Image (cartoon, rainbow, N blue to C red):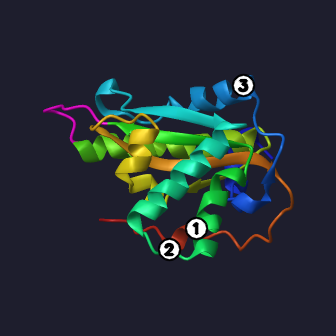
Amino acid sequence: MNDALKSLNRYSTPAKALSAPAPDQGQLEQILSIALTAPDHGRLRPYRFISIRGDARHHLSDIFGQAILQREPDVDPAYLQKQKDKPLRSPLIVVVVANLIDSPKIPEIEQMLSAGAAAHNILLASNALGFGSIWLTGANAYDPFVCKQLGLDEHERIIGFIYLGTPDFCIPRAAPPRVDDYLKNWE
């Protein structure tokens, strides 16, 4: 298959099915170099990335636990543990952060979309290098406590947590969607 068409085989790997090895620092830099080519009105590059691996995942687990307890003081202990286990499901997490810039010409929505395109490029690039990935959000992505603990400023938003690693198994793939079902020619 043509290298350019490898993207057709991209799919979200279940986070529970991602193990070591994850992209090493050099591979992560390649992946993020591709992320930096995302479409971007005004060349603002209104995004940045936070990599979390090793023991830092345990620290993120503690932050998730504290955030959940703040949101739901009477949370079921099993649910709390499930949420705390999320950062431990893959060897590497890349947090994609929209770094929103006050601009009279480039609205916030365009900046958010650019950050989303950068996140998608991470998925495509990691797939091209043979890694599995999944883009997750959930309540912790929007929680002010989590954002503060990760060092986000007031004008920044988490676009997603991208879990990266080596797939433990291949999941059955659904038939690809037909372009004709999604395309209408306007005349």
- The quarter holding residue 45 reads top left
Position of 155 with respect to 31 (left or right) is: left
Q: Which residues are magenta?
A: 100-107
Position of 66 with respect to 111 (left or right) is: right
Q: Residue at x 42, y 70 (%)?
A: 72
- Going by the numbered disc 1, the residue's amino acid type is Leu
Q: Is residue 124 visible?
A: no
Which circle, 3 or 1, is nearer the viewer?
1
Q: Quadrant of the C terminus?
A: bottom left
- The quarter holding residue 24 reads top right
**163 and 118: which one is in front?**
163
Q: Is residue 26 above or below residue 7?
A: above
Determine crowd level at label 1: few under 14, some 14-19, many 20+ residues with C-alpha closer than 10 A. some
Can you identify the residue that label 1 sits on?
Answer: 80
Sequence-earlier tag: 3 or 2: 3
Instruction: Tell me the number on the disc at residue 71.
Output: none
Sequence-earlier tag: 3 or 1: 3
Can you identify the residue that label 2 sits on?
Answer: 75
Can you identify the residue that label 3 sits on?
Answer: 25
Q: Is residue 76 above or below residue 150?
A: below
Labels 3 and 1 touching (C-beta < 8 A): no
Measured as percent of width and height from the top left, residue 13 is found at 72, 59
The CA distance from mark 2 to mark 1 is 7 Å
The CA distance from mark 3 to mark 1 is 32 Å
Position of 12 with respect to 108 (left or right) is: right
